[in-house]
Image (cartoon, rainbow, N blue to C red):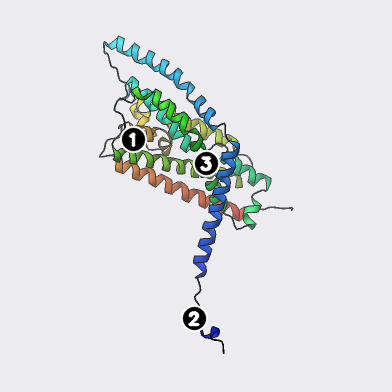
Amino acid sequence: MSTAANSPTHSVPTHLTGTRQKLRTYGSILKTALGERLVYRGDFALGTLMRFLPIVTQVFLWFAVFDAIGNAEGEEAATIGGFGFREIVAYYLLTMIARAFSSMPGLASGIAREIREGEIKRYLIQPVDLIGLLLLTRIAHKLAFYAVAIAPFALVFFLCRDYFVDGWPPPYRMTAFIGTLLMGFMIGFFLEAAIGMIGFWFLEVSSLLFIYMLFSFFLSGHMFPLSLLPDSIETIVTFLPLKYLAYFPAAVFLGKIPDEDLPMEMAIEAAWLTFFIVVCRFAFNRGVRRYSGYGG
């Protein structure tokens, strides 16, 4: 007589099975997206090196500015907004890294286009989360970018090592710098994704995206350190989340953020990240409710 019917059975809870399946699905998506980008984006290395060429112009420009100020005031080492000449050059190099993390070219416009052209329907009938999928593809894009572009970055920073007058920051500040880069990436993603979700209400978001890009270029600190702004304007700008896309990581690395202010600034950045995650999810859920798709 068989005892199989009397043997105890162990079943895995349904919610655990679903979680494992989602993790396997997202893992497959990330692996596939990363493989695709490593295959066809071999131009990352050359493209990255070319991005640093404008720095040469910036070096000559700021050298002339600081030289003129030094001659006018009779100082050998002039400073502007708390930055000396070498620190300004180092700042621009660091903002290149920060913007490489936080920039999301084509994200908002791509989401709006999928909504307008009806391609969003596939995410509504398939068990794949649109925001999760887009986030994984962007992570794959950044991983592929830095896997190929790390050599040009290392070369440029080696050649410009003399501009980093204080050398590498201490471990706690280096950890904070890496944290700001990762949170800057997430803020950049969810902010632009939220802009793309406006496509549920408007057919075209290019004008809004242009305005955002214009303000982001100036107010993120990518063009110049925010400490160069007049005090009345700087006070307002520093309350905006855009500074975490470029200025803040560079300022952390260079020690421009006092140690006693660093934990609070990091907490504020995390709060902005949480805010944009909620806004993005809320806009998507509300947009899906009002979305209507017709045809096959």
Name the secondary structure under disc 2.
loop
Q: Is residue 82 above or below residue 261?
A: above
Tell me which corner region of the image, top left, top right, bottom left or bottom right, holds residue 238: top left
The amino acid pointed to by label 3 is Glu
Mark 1 or mark 3, which is nearer the start of the sequence?
Answer: 3
Residue 24 image offset from top left, x and y in percent: 54, 57
Q: Which residue is mark 1?
A: 252
Mark-to-mark CA distance, 2 and 3: 52 Å
Mark seen at residue 8: 2
Q: Residue furthest front?
A: 1
- State whether residue 221 appears in this view: no
Q: Which residue is mark 3?
A: 192
Name the secondary structure under disc 3.
helix
Residue at 33 percent of width and 26 percent of height: 164
Residue at 36 percent of width and 44 percent of height: 268
Mark-to-mark CA distance, 3 and 1: 24 Å
